[in-house]
Amino acid sequence: MGDHNERREAASIDERGLRPPAAYSIRDGVTGVLTLEGELDLAAAPELRKRVDEFDGESLVLDMTRVTFIDSAVLRVLITAQERASAQGAGFAIAVADSSGHGVHRLLTLTGLDAKLSTRPSREDAIAAAGAR
């Protein structure tokens, strides 16, 4: 997945007429870890989906410990990512810590996805879980 190249998206209006929030970033990490930060919504979902789709390793971890908000578009990407990893026999886990935003925990709980998605309380636990598949 490359080195720690941080890619910040510009806060300009895209071709769909949406203005991505300047408060998010998606960074590649080592050993199949994508570090997500800030508010992830409809504007961030296509980039997240692209990064997940490009992954071809043995296990993938989405580190959401610094995410403050997600919406249904991002939930769909998370569900699809886990289903795809399972179908390919790859490990998958999501790190959602107490430091993650209240909106993240609330949406996962309200939708019941906290019990269905492979979530762990820390990046390290998520890496261990994904590697154990």
Image (cartoon, grey):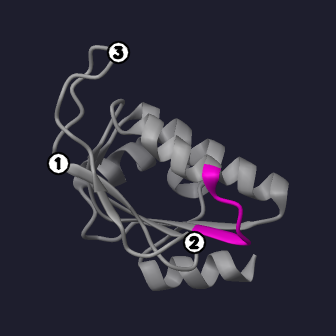
Q: Amino acid at mark 3?
A: Arg
In x, y percent, where is residue 10? 20, 40
Sequence-first disc among 3 and 1: 3
Mark 3 to mark 1 CA distance (whole Å): 19 Å
Q: Which residue is mark 1?
A: 23
Which class describes the residues within 10 Å of circle 2: few (<14), some (14-19), or many (20+)? many
Tell me which label, 3 or 2, sits earlier in the chain.
Answer: 3
Residue to which mark 3 is pinned: 16
Observer able to see residue 3: yes
- Residue 58 sits inside the magenta stretch: yes
Left or right of 50, for residue 29: left
State the SS at label 2. Answer: loop
Separation (CA) of disc 1 from disc 2: 23 Å
Looking at the image, can residue 112 be seen?
Answer: no
Residue type highlighted by circle 2: Gly
Residue of label 2: 32
Q: State the image coordinates of residue 42 (x, y, percent, origin top left).
A: 36, 30
